[in-house]
Amino acid sequence: MRQLLASLLFLLAIAPALAQAVRWEQSDTGDPSEVLLVFQDCTPEGDPKLPRIDGVTLTLAGTSSQTMINNFSLSRSTILTYRVRSTKSVPLQIPAFDVQTNKGSISVAAFTGGTPRSASDLNINATLAPGKNTLWAGEVFPLTYTLNVNRRHFSQLGTNVNWSPGALVVEEWSNPEPTESVLNGEPRLAISYRTRAYAKTPGPLELDAANQLVNVQTGSVGFGLFQAPRVEQLTVTTDRPRLNIRPLPPAPADFAGAVGQFKLVSKVVPEQATVGEPITWTLELSGTGNWPDIGGLPARSVSKNFQVIQPQAKRTAAEGKLFDVTLSEDVVLMPTQPGTYTLGPVSFVYFDPAAGAYKTLTTPRTTLTIAPAAPDPASAAPAQPSASSQADTVPAAPSFADLKAKVPTAPSGLPRDPLAGSLASRVPLSSSWLVGVAGAAIAAVIVFWLALATRRARATDPLNPQRAARQRLAETIAQIARTSGAERSTLLLRWQHDTAQLWSIPHAAPAATAFAQSPEWMKLWTEADRALYSAEAELPADWTTRASAALAAKTVPGFSPARIFLPRNLFPFVAAIALAALTVFASTGHAAERDPSAAYRAGDFETAATAWRKRVRENPTDAAARYNLSLALAQQDRWAEAAAHAAAAFVQAPAEPAIQWQFTLASQRAGFVPAPLARFLPPGPAEKFAAQASAGTWQFVYFGALLLAAGCLCVMITRGYRGSFGRFGWASVSVLGLALALGAASLGAAKTYGTAAHRDAVIVWRTGTLRSIPTEADNTQKTSPLPAGSLAVSGKTLLGWVQLTFDNGQTGWVRKEEVIGLWK
């Protein structure tokens, strides 16, 4: 007997320890991509450290708890839900491991689950494709990543492309470029990313695989009103392309490692000078190649009779490009002795991968002629000739024709000074109007503020859900009284949902005991549960009557106007008003930031251009900002972009002389002018009249003329009904004629600007390509050259592309950065 009692006590002592366990389970949802880690009678210490599984990623999706009573034994479990992402369509294999719990370390047995859904199951694939597989060391080549997915499964991209370049030197990935196609009757979406790269060292090279997370729709969860699409995140992985990097052939002695296609330009200004006059020798190397490995320009040799001032070379890369660079260096030479000198030639050796051979760029020789410095007139003592020699050497007086030929012409071809302020102006109001408008504005702000506060107070009232639920319950009870069968079951479920909301019970399906404070509601809930879930159960005949009475007794307080003045309802709008005021002050006063005009006059043209470009973005119709930006760009020899902004400034303020000058100068230097604006260079009589105001101003004048003409007609009709035309009638006829003439003239002046008068007008500022579809991936699409200076109307946009419509009806797509809006 004692032995039996000891055994029972031992079993009772070890029972809790035997009950503690951690195990894997497949989710009961039937989804093979979801597994559960169940902690029975214990809880995890921190995040469990799961074993590494090749090609599989386990992501924690949620945590829940469960309490069970079985044969009077209480068991509590903590359940961790994991989503499985696999790159292979094979059953899930999780090896055994140990996990730390509040009861110590517990071993988790190995687990074999179902086959998780992979990208290949949904016919989703990705490729990483180099432009070619055999390359020279240092050769720049294109690299394209393409994701191909069924359109009906695709939800959105989970991440950008995840790829390690390894031994390659690469640019940043481009923005995604989507294209759609149809395969076997199914629409498919291809999303491409592009970059360029080169390898420094020769030999075989296997690129790392690229991968990307993609959100796809694999079905739906829930039912009825609570149905929602099921979105899963899958990993798509590319293959690993192999490259053969060939070594360069034996190189010439002066080869410095440049691989690509290049251009070398030498320019000397002036070629004739005097001793002490500075001479600028500019050497510029540009092209596409392995610029990160190019140290600098080739060395230049100069005679010792020159003092040399050599600033640091300027390296300028194309926007967003690593391998398209221009390297320039300006050497200033100060001659110290007269004579004739030769500069150059300068040679640059590079390897051309397209030709597979070394090439040499050589600049031509430049001959400099240096004359002696002119003597100082003050220090030079002229010789006194004899009387006879004076008589023999007196020169003849020059003729008036010779003097006129020597009259100097005014200099031209330089940008003018920036314009201060803005050209946008408004008509001032009288002081009485200002006081009246200010008072009305203050009253309107107060009324508007209180209206917004009232709306916010009603929207944030915590009793809103209860009021809405109470209103729906009255309608539901009335419908329950008129229905039966399955339809009544649906209404009872709706009644239970709204009842839980009316009583502010957070559970989706509470028990009847949640209504313990109201026996009548608890009884109604129990009877509804019985009718829903018991076999052949029906509602009591008086259920709807008692439900209506209980609903009438359950009141919800109405909206309290005092909530309007709660800080959380008033302060958001105070903050918004303060922010608006700060914005106004910030836009009207630039005292805190550096004046772009000061930067321009100090020679910091890049800083000035950045500041004026910001002002143009904030206020595209500020003609002064457009004009000033054009000046700053012109000073940097960016004449094409400067001409586009000068054209925008001209159509906005054509009467400003400085803007007219810059528009003419920039168009000459850029070599293009938009067709509708070409008639203004030089202007004829109609263009001179139209240039007195912008197209928008002429349209405003046209509307004013129409209103004036309508008023005159009203006066004439009134006088006609009175039977006496009188002086006012005849005066109205005269004014009507003037109004019609002014309207016709203003309408004609506005039309003189052509497409430039359209609010969506844009100008193409550099030569490009007009494409029939918005992508550069499809080489089979039809394209057309697009010259700089083309004027069009912008329309739809798509992922960095904009559709243009031209005067002849032609449409096409270009990159947004290729065009500049005239009004936006």
Image (cartoon, helix red, strand yellow):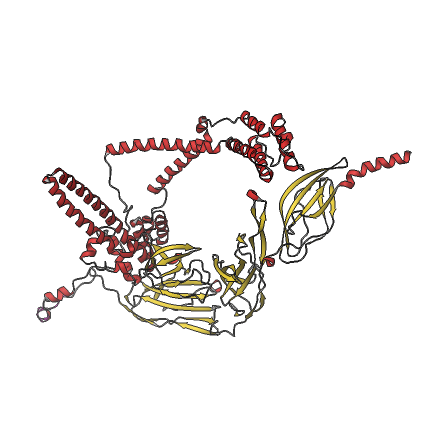
| Residue at position x 35%, y 48% in the image | 615
Q: Is residue 393 above or below residue 316?
A: below
- The main secondary structure of the magenta stretch is helix
How many numbered marks appear?
Answer: 0
Q: In this view, does 690 lie above or below 443?
A: below
Q: In this view, does 499 lie above or below 601?
A: above
Residue 242: percent from left, percent from top: 58, 67
Q: Quadrant of residue 207?
A: bottom right
Query: Quick one: 602 or 234, which is closer to the camera?
Result: 234
Residue 738: percent from left, percent from top: 15, 47
Q: In this view, does 702 lie to the left or right of 110?
A: left
Q: Is residue 495 left or right of residue 78?
A: left
User: Which region shows up in magenta?
Assistant: 384-392
Residue 780 magenta-highlighted = no
Query: Quick one: 509 or 382, which is closer to the camera?
Result: 509
Q: In which quarter of the image is residue 284?
A: bottom left
Q: Can residue 67 be seen in this view?
A: yes
Residue 754: percent from left, percent from top: 27, 56
Residue 387 magenta-highlighted = yes
Q: Quadrant of residue 261?
A: bottom left
Residue 446: percent from left, percent from top: 36, 31
Quadrant of the rendering where the N terminus is positioned: top right
Q: Is residue 589 visible?
A: no
Query: Quick one: 156 or 712, which is closer to the camera?
Result: 712
Q: Is residue 128 left or right of residue 36?
A: left
Residue ranking furthest to the right: 1
| Residue at position x 10%, y 65% in the image | 400
